[in-house]
Image (tube, helix red, strand yellow):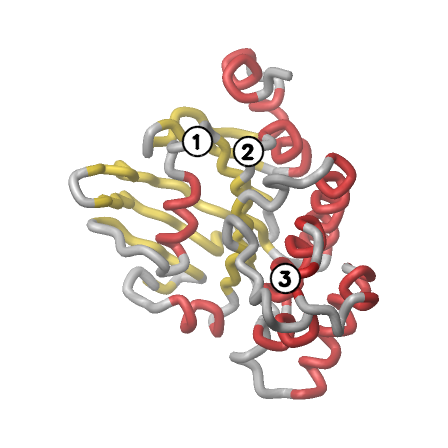
Amino acid sequence: MEQILEVKNLHVHYGMIHAIKGLDFHVNKGEIVTLIGANGAGKTSTLQTITGLIPHSQGEIIYRGENVSKLPGYKLVSKGLAHVPEGRRVFASLTVYQNLMLGAYTRKNSKEIEESLNMIYHHFPRLLERKNQVAGTLSGGEQQMLAMGRALMSKPEMILLDEPSMGLSPIYVNEIFDIIQKIHESGVTVLLVEQNANKALMIADRAYVLETGNIRLEGKAGDLLSDPQVRAAYLSE
C-alpha cells in the first residue's frame, strides 16, 4: 500500500524531559490509524510535532514522499495535511461561518470553497443551523464539530484528530465517531489520537499503543481490540 505519512526515529524533548523516544510508525493512504495510550504517553506531542507546532530534536517526518520535518504548519496545510487540536481551539469571538472560512485561507477558488462549505453543512447540519452564532456560545460537542469542519475546509488529503471525544456526552461521542467514519469514506486519510480506546479501535484499520514515548504494541485494530494486555490496560470499563 502507498504510504502517505512516515515518522522515522522521532525524538522530542521538553527541556530535560525526553518525551518522544525514537518513534517509528506509518500511515497508508486511505486508512484510519489510531494512537492509543495513557495520559503522558506522547500522543498529543506526536501530532503536534508532525504538524510543526513543536520542534523535534531528531528524526524525519515524510509526508507524501517529501521530508517535511522543517516546514511550518501553514505550509503543511497547503500540502493537504490538517490538524484538529486537543481542546478544539475555535475562535470564540467569531461566528461559525467565520471560523469555517478561516479554514479555507490557503485556497483561492471561490467556487470550490463554496462546494466545501456545502459539504461541511451536509456533514454537520447543526453548523448550518448555527452559522451566524458566535462560536464561544456553542456546546462542547458543537465546538468539536466546528473544529473538524474548519479543518476540512482546507480540503485535506489527511486529517489528524487529537482527542475529538474529550469531555463530550455519550450522545455527542457517538455522533463524532460517526462523522469520523463519514470523513474517511469521503477519501480522507485519518490519524486519530483518542482516550476512548475502545471506540477508536472499533473504527480504525490499524493501531499503535504508545507508552512513555515509545511504541509498545502495534497491529490490526481488531487484533488489538481483543488482545488481553490491551483490554486490561486501556479497555477496562
Q: Secondary structure at mark 3?
A: helix
Q: Amino acid at mark 3?
A: Gly
Q: Amino acid at mark 1?
A: Asn
Looking at the rendered image, the disc whose residue lies closer to the viewer, 3 or 2, is 3
Residue located beneath label 3 in the image: 136
In the figure, is residue 7 to the left or right of 165? Answer: left
Dot 3 surroundings within 10 Å: few (below 14), some, or many (20 or more)? some
Q: Is residue 97 above or below residue 85?
A: below
Q: Secondary structure at mark 1?
A: loop
Residue located beneath label 1 in the image: 39
Q: CA distance from mark 3 to mark 2?
A: 24 Å
Q: Amino acid at mark 2?
A: Gln
Q: Earlier in the sequence, mark 3 or mark 2?
A: 3
Q: CA distance from mark 2 to mark 1?
A: 8 Å
Report x, y in % for residue 7. 36, 48
Is mark 2 in CB contact (under 8 Å) with mark 1? yes
Q: Earlier in the sequence, mark 1 or mark 3?
A: 1
Looking at the rendered image, the disc whose residue lies closer to the viewer, 1 or 3, is 3
Dot 1 surroundings within 10 Å: few (below 14), some, or many (20 or more)? few
Q: Looking at the image, which residue sits at the far left?
A: 16
In the figure, is residue 232 to the left or right of 18? Answer: right
Q: Earlier in the sequence, mark 2 or mark 1?
A: 1
Report x, y in % for residue 57. 20, 50
Residue located beneath label 2 in the image: 195
Label drawn at residue 212: none
